[in-house]
C-alpha cells in the first residue's frame, strides 16, 4: 500500500493544512492579548470571539452546499484567501493604533470564511487518497494539527515577546496564502451533482444524515461531548486554582490534553478496529472521568492523568470518524454531511459556555461538572445500543445513487 505522502495531491494538501495549523495555533494567545491591550476588558474579548463564531455557525450549511456544488478545492482556495486578508488586516491594525471595531469585523469575515472552509476538508482527502489509505492520511493530518496545538502557545509567546501580537496574525495570514497556493496546483477527483436549488441541496444532505442511525446518533453524542467540554473549560480553571493547587495544575491539564490528542492521532494511524465508530464512541465516554474528578476535587495528578487519557480518545476518534464518513457517504454529499457534523459539534459549545456559570452560581461547581459527566457517559456510551453503530464495520458501503460515478479532475 502506497504511503499517502507519496501521493502528490495529498502531499500538497497536507503541507497546506500543516502550515495553516501552525498559524492557527499561534493566534488564540495573540488574540486574547491584543484585545485586552486594545480594549482592556474580557467583555471585548467575548465580543470578538462571538463575531467569529456566530457567522461560522449560521453559514456552515451553505458552505457544505457550495463545496459539493462548486468543487471543494475552489471553495477552499477562496476561503483561504479571505482568511488570509482578514488576518492580515488584524495584523496591520495591531502594528499601529488598533481599533476594536476593525478587529471584530475581521474576526467576523474570518469566521464566515471558516464556514466555507470546514466542509471542504473531508472531500479534499477523499478526492486525493484511495480508500485503503484514508485512515492513515487523516491520522497524519491529526498528528500535525495536534503537534501544532502543543507547540503553538510557546511559539505565540516567543513571537509576541519579540515583535508584538500583530506579527502572529501576519504569520497566520502567510500560512493561509501558502495553503491557497498549494491548493491551486492540486488535482482533486470529484463527482458532479445534479443542479437543484440551495434548499433542495440542503434537504438532500439532511436526508443522507437522517437515513443513517449510526451517524446522527453519534452526532448527538459528539455534540453532548463538546457541550461538556465547554463546561469543563469554563469551570475547570477555577476548580484547579481554588481546590487542586493553583494555576499550574490547569496548565498541566491543558498540556496533558495536548499530548493526549497527539498520542491519539498517532494511535489512529496504526489501530483499525473492526467496528470503528463503536470503539471510538466508547472511548469518548472516558471524558466523564475528568469531569467527575474535578467535581469532587480529586488529587491533581489523578485529574491530569484522566484528562490526558480522555483527550487521547478524542485524538483517536477524529481521524477514525473522518475515515468512516468518507467511506460511507457518496462523494457528492460529503461536504454537506460534514457541514452538519460541524454544526452540531460547534453549536453545542456556546450552550455549555452559557449554562455552566449560571449553574455554578446556583448550585456550585460540582453540580454542572457531574451533570456534564453523566450526560457524556450516557450519550457516548449509549450509542452502543444503536444497531447501526454496532453493525458498522470498516469496509466502505456501496455508493449507489442517481449521480454518475465518473470521477472528474479539476
Image (cartoon, helix red, strand yellow):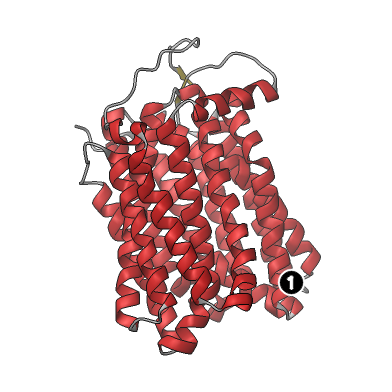
Q: Can you say whether 172 is above or below 214 in the image?
A: below
Q: Evaluate whether residue 180 shows in this view.
A: no
- The reply, left or right, for residue 394 in relation to residue 44 is left
In the rendered view, does 359 fall on the left or right side of 292?
right
Residue wearing tag 1: 44
Q: Residue 65, relative to residue 11: is it above or below?
A: above
Whether residue 317 sits left or right of residue 33 in the image: it is left
Give coordinates of residue 107: x percent, y percent. Answer: 69, 58
In the picture shown, does residue 101 fall above or below 37?
above
Where is residue 299 drawn, in percent x and y? 33, 83
Crowd tier of the residue under label 1, counting other residues whose Cα lies within 10 Å: few below 14, some 14–19, many 20 or above:
some
Viewer can see residue 16: yes
Q: Residue at x 38, y 63 (%)?
A: 288
Q: 244 or 269, which is in the foreground?
A: 244
Residue in view at x 62 percent, y 58 percent: 351
Element on which disc 1 rests: helix
Where does residue 62 sit, x and y in percent of width and height? 66, 34
Amino acid at each position: 500500500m502506497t504511503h499517502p505522502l507519496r501521493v502528490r495531491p495529498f502531499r500538497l494538501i497536507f503541507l497546506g493544512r500543516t502550515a495553516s495549523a501552525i498559524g492557527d495555533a499561534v493566534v488564540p494567545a495573540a488574540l486574547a492579548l491584543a484585545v485586552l491591550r486594545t480594549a482592556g476588558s474580557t467583555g471585548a474579548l467575548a465580543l470578538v470571539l462571538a463575531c467569529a463564531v456566530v457567522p461560522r455557525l449560521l453559514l456552515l450549511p451553505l458552505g457544505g452546499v457550495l463545496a459539493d456544488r462548486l468543487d471543494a478545492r475552489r471553495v477552499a482556495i477562496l476561503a483561504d484567501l479571505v482568511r488570509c486578508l482578514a488576518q492580515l488586516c488584524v495584523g496591520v491594525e495591531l502594528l499601529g493604533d488598533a481599533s476594536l471595531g476593525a478587529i471584530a469585523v475581521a474576526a467576523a469575515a474570518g469566521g464566515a470564511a471558516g464556514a466555507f472552509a470546514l466542509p471542504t476538508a473531508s472531500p479534499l482527502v477523499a478526492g486525493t487518497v484511495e480508500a485503503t489509505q484514508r485512515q492513515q492520511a487523516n491520522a497524519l493530518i491529526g498528528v500535525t494539527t495536534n503537534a501544532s496545538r502543543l507547540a503553538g502557545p510557546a511559539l505565540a509567546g516567543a513571537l509576541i515577546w519579540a515583535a508584538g501580537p500583530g506579527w502572529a496574525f501576519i504569520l497566520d495570514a502567510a500560512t493561509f496564502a501558502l495553503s491557497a497556493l498549494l491548493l491551486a496546483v492540486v488535482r482533486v477527483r470529484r463527482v458532479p451533482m445534479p443542479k437543484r436549488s440551495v434548499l433542495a441541496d440542503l434537504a438532500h444532505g439532511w436526508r443522507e444524515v437522517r437515513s443513517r442511525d449510526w451517524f446522527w446518533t453519534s452526532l448527538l453524542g459528539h455534540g453532548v461531548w463538546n457541550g461538556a467540554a465547554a463546561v469543563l473549560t469554563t469551570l475547570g480553571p477555577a476548580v484547579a486554582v481554588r481546590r487542586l493547587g493553583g494555576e499550574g495544575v490547569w496548565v498541566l491539564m491543558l498540556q496533558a490534553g495536548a499530548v493526549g490528542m497527539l498520542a491519539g492521532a498517532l494511535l489512529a494511524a496504526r489501530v483499525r478496529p473492526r467496528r470503528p465508530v463503536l470503539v471510538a464512541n466508547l472511548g469518548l465516554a472516558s471524558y466523564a472521568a475528568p469531569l467527575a474528578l474535578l467535581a469532587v476535587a480529586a488529587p491533581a495528578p489523578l485529574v491530569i492523568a484522566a484528562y490526558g487519557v480522555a483527550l487521547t480518545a478524542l485524538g483517536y476518534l477524529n481521524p477514525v470518524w473522518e475515515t468512516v464518513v468518507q467511506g460511507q457517504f457518496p462523494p457528492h454529499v460529503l461536504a454537506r454531511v460534514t457541514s452538519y457534523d460541524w454544526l452540531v459539534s460547534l453549536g453545542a459549545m456556546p450552550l455549555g459556555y452559557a449554562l455552566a456559570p449560571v449553574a455554578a452560581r446556583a448550585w456550585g461547581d460540582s453540580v454542572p461538572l457531574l451533570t456534564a459527566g453523566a450526560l457524556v457517559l450516557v450519550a457516548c456510551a449509549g450509542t452502543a445500543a444503536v444497531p447501526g453503530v454496532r453493525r458498522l464495520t470498516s469496509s466502505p458501503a456501496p455508493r449507489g445513487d442517481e449521480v454518475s460515478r465518473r470521477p472528474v479532475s479539476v
